[in-house]
Image (cartoon, rainbow, N blue to C red):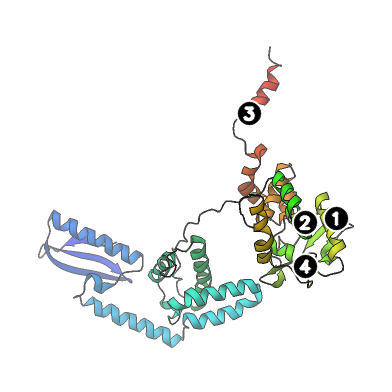
Amino acid sequence: MAKVRARKETGNLFFDFKFQGMRCREQTALPDTKENRLKLETVARKIEASITLDQFNYSDFFPQSSMVQKFTQRAQQIEALHSKKGLPTVKEFKEQWLDEMLPTWRTSYINSVTCIFNGHILPAFEEKVVSHITKADILQFRATLAKASPVTGKSRRATTVNKILKIFRLMMCEAADRFDFNSPFIGVKLLKEQKTDIHPLSLDEVHTLLKNVRPDFHDYFKVRFFSGMRSGEVTGLRWEHIDFERKQILVRETVIQGRVEYTKNDGSFRVIDMTTPLLEALESQHKVTGKQDYVFSNRLGKALDNRNVCNRVWYPLLDFLDLKRRRLYETRHTAATLWMAAGENPEWIARQLGHVNTEMLFKIYSRFVPNLTRRDGSAFEELINENDGGES
C-alpha cells in the first residue's frame, strides 16, 4: 500500500510504495505538516489505485525520477524475453485457437465468433503479443465497446458487449494457461445486463390468431403454439422424426441461417409428447407435405425461412388483429405459459421445452399463471375458513 512518510534527516515527506515487486521511495521538498500530508495522501491513494488496476505509469507521477528509466529497461527486457520464447500476437494465436475449436462448434457459432474477432477484437489488439495485454487494456476495451457509435449514435447493449468480452476472455484464458502468464481478464466484470420481458399470447389470442391466419400457415402456427419448439427446430422438422404411432415428435435438428445443424444442446435433443391439438395439426399437414422431406416447406420443397415468415405472415397478422408486435419466438413462450396455467407437471413441461430442470419455468413464466403467482393471501384465508367450522 502506498504510504506517505517523513525523513528523519530533513523532516520532508516522501512516498513509499511497491511496484512490480520493487520498493519505491520518491522524495518531495514538502515539510511534514498536516496540510501537506493530506495533499500527498490523496496522491498516494491514486498511486495505489493505479497499481491495483494495472494502469500505473511511473512517469505520469514522477517524470524526473531515475526509476522511470529502470522500469522502462525492465519492460524492454521482459518484452525481449517474451520474444525469445516466441509468444504469438493476438492475431496469430486467434488463428491457431480457432482451428483447434472448430470441431467443437456449430457453423452459426463459428460465424458469430469470426465476426466478433474481425469487427472488434483484432482492430484493437491484432499486433499485440498475448502476454503484453494488461487489465488496463481490457478495461479500456470494455469502455470503448460500451460507448455510443460515432456512426449511428447508439450505444451497444450490455449483452452485446458481454458477448464480445466472453469470446476474447475464452481465448486469452487459453493463451494464459498455455504460455504461463496471468490472464488480463482476472478481476474484470461483465456489464450488468437488462432482463428482457417475454410477451406470450393468451389462449383467446391464440384461438383468434389461428382463426384468421392464412390457411396454408394454420397448421404451422398450431404446431408452434402447442409444441413449444424453437424457430429453428420447427423449420428443421422432418417427417422421419414424426412418430404418429407413439404420438411423439423427435427433435433432432435445427435450421440456423439456412444450415441444418444439430440441436442447441443435449437437453434440446428430446422427445415431445403430442397433445390432441398438436396431433391434429400434424395429421392435417401430412396430407399436404407428407411426401416431402420437411414438415413445413416452401413451394420448392425447401425449409421455410423464419425471417420471411415473420415479415410476410406473422407481423401482418398481428397488425391485422391489432395485437402487439412481438417476436415469432413468443409462440414457444406461449406454449409454456398455457401448459403451466393448465396445471401440467413442471417436469413434463421442462422436458417438452428442452430445459435441464424446472428452474427456468418458475423464473420466467410463473408471473403469467395467476394460480401460481397470486400473493394476496386469499388461499390462506380459504384454508382458515374451511377449518373454522371445527372450532367450538
Q: Which label sits on residue 297?
A: 4
Among the 4 quarters of the image, the one containing residue 294 = bottom right
Q: Nearer the viewer, residue 117 or 58?
A: 117
Q: Is residue 358 left or right of residue 182?
A: right
Q: Nearer the viewer, mark 1 or mark 2?
A: 2
Q: Estimate the x, y position of residue 6 in percent, counting from the top left.
A: 15, 61
Q: Which label sits on residue 247?
A: 1
Residue projecting furthest to the right = 245
Q: Which three-letter amino acid code belongs to the residue tagged 4?
A: Ser
Q: Which three-letter amino acid code belongs to the residue tagged 1?
A: Lys
For the C terminus, the image quarter is top right
Q: Is residue 358 left or right of residue 134?
A: right
Q: Earlier in the sequence, mark 1 or mark 3?
A: 1
How far, Cα to Cα, is label 3 from label 2? Answer: 40 Å
Is the Cβ of the residue at disc 1 closer than 8 Å to that at disc 4? no
Q: Nearer the viewer, residue 156 or 377?
A: 156
